[in-house]
Image (cartoon, helix red, strand yellow):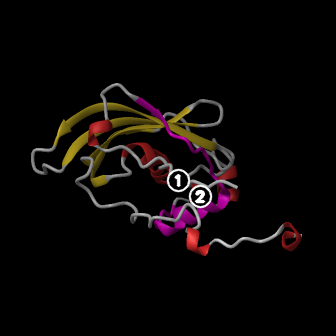
Amino acid sequence: MGEQVTRLVPGWDGRYFEDFTVGDVYRHPLGRTVLPTDNSWFTLLTQNTAPLHFDANYAAQTTWRRPLVDSTFTLALVTGQSVTDVSQHVFANLGWDEVRMPAPVFEGDTIYSASEVSTARASRSHSDAGVVTVRTTGFNQDGVTVISFLRTVMVYRRGLGPVTRPPVEDQPTATAPEAQTTISAEQAR
């Protein structure tokens, strides 16, 4: 048998400042179904006392007839979905602007998202980073937009930020000749 050669193939590591181009659109890879537990826990953890989010009996008496998902959960979820494409190498999150929620999110909805690069410029205060603004849109399983916002982040330049994972030790790809042993066909059975 010949030598087995191992080849390390890097996975997606996120964008650095140099990778952003105004007008590019990133369709974020993961959707997420909102569970009743997500809604009630997030609402109660953040001390939101509006029963519309965690009291099904109360919610049944409203226009919605069912619990409405806490809007700050929706903002957090869609922001999180964008990290792999927008802020994996974040220096600092600078803010959200123009947050709009044109349609409600309900328990059981699956949320997807995409971001379009609006601006990208070198940072004036940190030479190791740039400032990027994206317009992110979240939509449900029916394609209905449920949230949109501008998000501005400072992102490291390639090679100037923290190392995201330690280097991999070199792995031997073949057995050294002195360690090889010869066995007969009879011994192999």
> At numbered mark 1, what does the secondary structure look like: helix, strand or loop?
loop
- Which amino acid type corresponds to the residue marked 2 in the rendered image? Asn
* Camera-side residue of 145 and 104: 145
Q: Is residue 57 above or below residue 169?
A: above
Image point (50%, 64%), residue name: 49
- Which amino acid type corresponds to the residue marked 1 in the rendered image? Asp
- Image quadrant holding the N terminus, namely bottom right
Res 125 label: none
Pointer 1 or 2: first along the chain: 2
Residue 52 spot, x, y in % from top left: 59, 54
Residue 17 spot, x, y in % from top left: 27, 42
Is 183 left or right of 64, judged from the image as shown?
A: right
Is 78 left or right of 57, judged from the image as shown?
A: left
Image point (51%, 40%), residue name: 28
Q: Is residue 153 above or below residue 182?
A: above
Q: Which residue is mark 2?
A: 39
Residue 28 among magenta residues: yes
> At numbered mark 2, what does the secondary structure look like: helix, strand or loop?
helix
Residue 47 among magenta residues: yes
Residue 129 spot, x, y in % from top left: 20, 48
* Residues at marks 1 and 2 touching, judged by CB atoms closer than 8 Å: yes
Q: Which residue is mark 1?
A: 70
Residue 54 visible to the viewer: no
Give residue 15's quadrant in the image. Answer: top left
Other residues around mark 2 within 10 Å, as few (<14) / some (14–19) / many (≥20): many
Q: Is residue 89 above or below residue 97?
A: below
Give residue 173's quadrant in the image. Answer: bottom right
Residue 100 spot, x, y in % from top left: 41, 37
Residue 130 visible to the viewer: yes
Look at the image and give the residue range highlighted in magenta. Answer: 25-49
Is 10 left or right of 110, judged from the image as shown?
A: left
